[in-house]
Amino acid sequence: MLHTSADDWRQAPKKRVLFFGMSGLGKTHVSNMLRDTGNWFHYSIDYRIGTRYMGEYIADNAKAHAMQVPFLRDLLLSDSIYIGSNLSFHNLTPVSTYLGKPGNPDLGGLPWAEYTRRQEQFRQAEISALMDTRYFIDRAEALYGYPNFICDTGGSICEWVDPDNPEDPVLKALSQDTLMIWIEGNAAHTQELIRRFNRAPKPMAYQPEFLARCWAEYLAETGRAEAEVDPDAFIRWTYGRALAHRQPLYRKMAENWGVSVTAEAIHSVASAQDFDDLVAAAIAQKTG
């Protein structure tokens, strides 16, 4: 772990942290709060994925749809219009829209083979973005003079790592450069996340083995063929299982590679000093 004691954390002239956990529990909230102090550089993994690693996929997908409309096709072929995504820190919709959902094409679903191809593209993109953390730490200090650094990860980080492997390349690299902090939710948070997701289901990325198992189980349970599946129904069905699948992975990541704080504690953070105190307490609890 990057800091061996609470005092070591408090006295560090440069603080570097990485937040992980389910989306919706406060990672981006506290990242924005710290960034707004003017002393923290905020590195968003999801933003890096959408701009550096999947931007071309996203734009080409939009162009492919536009090419099906004769009016837009003519304008594209004559270079009269430009199509791109308006992705930002606060609008990551182009990434999730590109990932898509499997099932009935009349309901916006993708064929399973295309859906899993895009999942694999995302897996590679997220790993690459995570491994760029060291580069952005150096860049933030050399170019902008920021002493402190936040890596704000997506909820799927746990899908691509083995927290029980001390030689896991991603976790080993991240833990050498940042203090990894799990934002842990409770049962009430889980139910609230499920309620929100059911109201507005959005595409997510999952470990290939987990996803294939869910797909096979869903088809068997519903008796539907691939092209008959309601895409939203499938991803709603999968989401609750995903929360249960990810929780032990997050816990192992915190136990073996970092510390944990509760979502309630994160939401009570109102200043950089509050954050320092919270992390110091988490380190003290971990190190005894």
Image (tube, grey):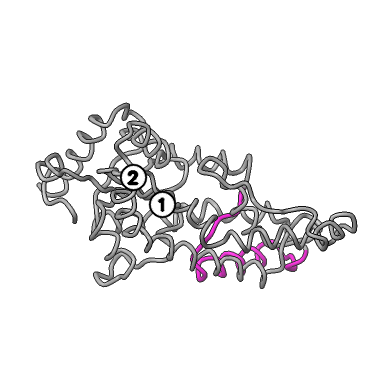
Which badge, 1 or 2, comes first in the chain's sequence?
Answer: 2
Q: Main secondary structure of the magenta part?
A: helix
Looking at the image, the residue that sits furthest to the right is 70
- Pick whichever, 175 or 222, lies toward us: 175
- Pick whichever, 194 or 268, lies toward us: 268
Residue 108 locus on image (x, y percent): 75, 56
Residue 221 locus on image (x, y percent): 65, 63
- Tell which tag, 1 or 2, sits nearer the viewer: 2
Q: Which residue is mark 2?
A: 144
User: Residue shown at 34%/33% (left/top)?
Assistant: 264
Left or right, residue 262 beside residue 84: left
The stretch in magenta equals 202-227
User: Residue shown at 56%/39% (left/top)?
Assistant: 195
- Pick whichever, 141 or 26, lies toward us: 141
Dot 2 amino acid type: Tyr
Relative to 136, residue 35 above or below: above
Q: Which residue is mark 1?
A: 153
